[in-house]
Amino acid sequence: MQYFLDLALKTAQGNMLADSEQKTLLELPYEETHRLFPGAELLRRNFCANKIRVCAITNAKSGKCSEDCAFCAQSAHHNTSINSYPLKNPGQMSLEGRNMSAQGVNRFSLVTSGKGLEAEEVQQVCRVTRELASQGISPCASLGVLKQQELQELKDAGLTRYHHNLETAPGFFPSICTTHDYSQRTETVRLARQTGLSVCSGAVFGLGESDAHVLELALTLRELDVDAVPVNFLVPIPGTPLENNDQLTPLRCLKIICMLRYMLPRHEIIVCGGRLENLGELHPLIFMAGASGLMTGNYLTRQGRGVAEDMQMITDMGLEPA
């Protein structure tokens, strides 16, 4: 246990882990994941204090996506039973954001299906963003591939953060998506960063990737200099190519969070979709594993957990919602 605590102290001082140290982290058996907790918690407290960032989303536009991501319920390539609908009315989106804010959730994201948005849809999102920002809410958006001019318009409207997941490591991406390549995803992240937006970019785990792919992803995110890393755990959706994938265990989920914290010590690590289904009784240990944030409320196509329950869990762990 002392070895991994020493690694955490090394990274806390701004030093990168050597290849041999990354290998030791990678090869730690899942049943020994608890050995990573003291170092992961040290790093979280050092860079994120006692605060746990809480965010929420709305599925602002659902289904009929042209892309074939193997895990996704919203892809038009898969036979799923989700609700599909066009972009929500701006008033409805604003109301959802205000409702979340009233429950103590200050960061609210508008998430749309599809590779990108039409120009008029971007303008509607800008209107919602202005409204949310005027209410003191931190607006975020996940709108797919956008031009830099559109990102600038969103920023000018008050957008604080842009979300665009890499989904997995570059070496594994061709196994889960064939309709676009990895460079399109990284370019969008770079454009958002160049626009001056805070950037949130992470992945879905449990797609069939190895722990070596988790490490590869962490190195990619570090090179892209993202601010926040959302961590999603696969909940297999009937009708998708991964409907029978069942590769995650609670201990592997916790080790993934730990690995990301050791590799990305200064970043926000936000545990999002699939946390309850995959972590079960070990769910509150996400904070000991290094998580500094979580997504509360409903997800894109599935019901989530109530805000009050998540706030209580944070308090019960001796932490403070932020």
Image: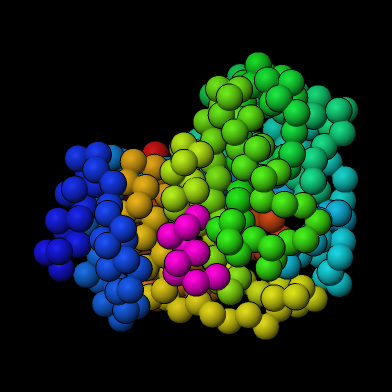
Task: State how many labels appear.
Answer: 0
Task: Check the image and report above or below for 197 versus 283.
Answer: above
Task: Check the image and report above or below for 224 versus 33.
Answer: above
Q: Check the picture and name the quadrant holding the N terminus.
A: bottom left
User: In this view of the protein, which residue sits in the foreground, 273 or 18?
Assistant: 18
Q: Check the picture and name the quadrant holding the C terminus.
A: top left
Question: On the image, which quarter does residue 246 sit in?
Answer: bottom right
Say which residue appears at 49% left-offset and 48% top-offset: 220
Q: Is residue 293 visible?
A: no
Report whether 122 appears left or right of 253.
Answer: right
Question: On the image, which quarter does residue 279 sit in?
Answer: bottom left
Report whether 180 appears left or right of 200.
Answer: right
Part of the protein shown in magenta? 209-217
Q: Is 216 within the magenta? A: yes
Residue 196, x across and y down, in percent: 55, 22
Residue 309, x across and y down, in percent: 45, 58
Q: Which residue lies furthest to the left in this view?
A: 2
Report whether 168 appears left or right of 214.
Answer: right
User: In this view of the protein, which residue sits in the foreground, 39 or 279?
Assistant: 39
